[in-house]
Image (cartoon, rainbow, N blue to C red):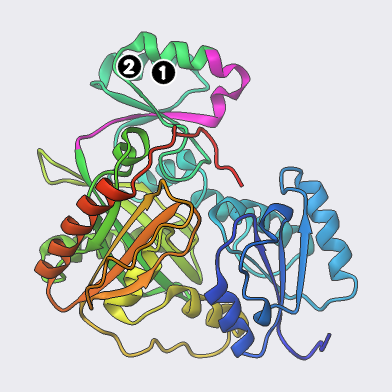
Amino acid sequence: MDPARPCILCVSSYFKGNRFLQQCKRDGAQVLLLTVASTLQEPWAREAIDEVHALPSFTEWRHVLNGVAYLLRSRPVRTIVALDDFDVELVASLREHFRLPGMNESTARFFRDKLAMRVKAVELGIPVPEFTAVHYHEDVRRFLATVPAPWLLKPRAEASAMGIRKCHHPDEVWQHLDRLGDEQSFFLLERMIPSDLYHVDSLVVERQVVFSEVSRYRRPLLEVYHEGGIFASQTVARHLPEVATLRGLNERLLLGFGMVRGTSHTEYLRARDTGQFYFLETSARVGGASISDMVEAATGVNLWEEWAKLETDPERSHRLPPLRSEYGGVVVSLARQEWPDSTGFADPEICYRLQQKHHIGLVVRSASLERIDQLLDDYSARIARDHHAVAPPSDKATH
């Protein structure tokens, strides 16, 4: 390999990030992919990857470190990136071991550990729902006695709504903690606030938030994940005051958490009774479930590609592409069919169709927010009737 060219090792335990890989190759980088064996049959952008390497799993970090050390003996890797949320802490550990630039382990905690991010948000003066760690039981008793139910028992390191338990009575909480045994300290307890759920998708360049797009989930993810239903999100009208509020909160949060460069998908609650915004969770990754395609549809900015440009040449002055000011929407569902036929959805506003087994998904773009509403209403109803499937919620992500 040419030591004069940037050499990037991309680590991902899931199939994602082709646009990142392709942009790295366009920028002249040598691209290595380290993934798990179960993803090798996925349609990776092989034309953009110089080498693909796989391990049976990433469960044992020492095995991953040994494998990466072997690769680095003969390859001039100067950058390691995590394409998936579940690999952020692993890659931070690899950077620390090999003394490579990028987010370290302490900072990565703020973008993966739900307890760490809440404690830090409180330090920054950013509102969060009342919460407590669960390793000291007297704190748990005090919380249950003073904070109104319902409560959410959350794993600190899972993604989205995975593994969350909703509890209405203290006995339920203690029963769950008893079952967790030695795993208790890997959870936190939080007040559940009836709310609407927003997300802000951002790009940070040298400690400056240069792009952020505010969107709103049509139903809270906890409801979709545990009760079944259609996932959908859409751009929020940019003139509304909550957009400026969330952008300001988001900038304080990301810079306070120590993000230097990269992308983030961050979620906020808006209490239905008071209108108060609360920080829920953040990440050092591109939003999943075709959210990045929705953001690109509305703005012209592909966060995968912009992030790749930062990684291939951190010293280069970064310039965003010309921005559109339209609206986007996305609808995604688990499907009964292995490869559902979406050709019946033929509106000209459709700009992306998800191609994934047992899933159906569409992204739409329009200059009219009312039109986005109409399409998402229509598509959600039709998908629910003709395609939607429900799977039991899982406590952990699976490959």
Rendered image: mark on residue 290: none
- Give x and y (percent) for residue 28: 66, 90
Identify whether 34 is placed above or below 281. below
Identify whether 370 is placed above or below 359. below
- Give x and y (percent) for residue 211: 34, 75
Q: Nearer the viewer, residue 161 or 357?
A: 357
Identify whether 378 is placed above or below 304. above
Residue type marked 1: Val
- Give x and y (percent) for residue 283: 46, 55
CB-based contact (under 8 Å), mark 1 and mark 2: yes
Q: In the figure, residue 369 lies in which quadrant?
A: bottom left
Q: In the figure, residue 265 lies in which quadrant?
A: bottom left
Q: Secondary structure at mark 2?
A: helix
Q: Which span is picked out in magenta?
A: 179-194
Q: Nearer the viewer, residue 212 or 84?
A: 84
Inspect the magenta stretch and tell me whether residue 192 lies in it: yes
- At 14% from the left edge and 62% from the top edge, which residue is drawn? 373
Side of 186 relative to 220 (left or right): right
The outermost residue toward the top is 171
- At 62% from the left edge and 20% from the top edge, which residue is drawn? 182
- At 23% from the left edge and 78% from the top edge, which residue is drawn? 348
Q: Secondary structure at mark 1?
A: helix
| Cα gap from disc 1 to disc 2, whole angstroms | 6 Å
- Give x and y (percent) for residue 185: 55, 26
- At 46% from the left edge and 57% from the top edge, which residue is drawn? 339
Residue type marked 2: Leu
Judging by the rendered image, the residue that carries numbered circle 1 is: 140
Side of 223 relative to 277 (left or right): right
Side of 396 relative to 277 (left or right): right
Label 2 packing within 10 angstroms: few (<14), some (14-19), many (20+): many
Q: Nearer the viewer, residue 253 or 21?
A: 21
Judging by the rendered image, the residue that carries numbered circle 2 is: 144
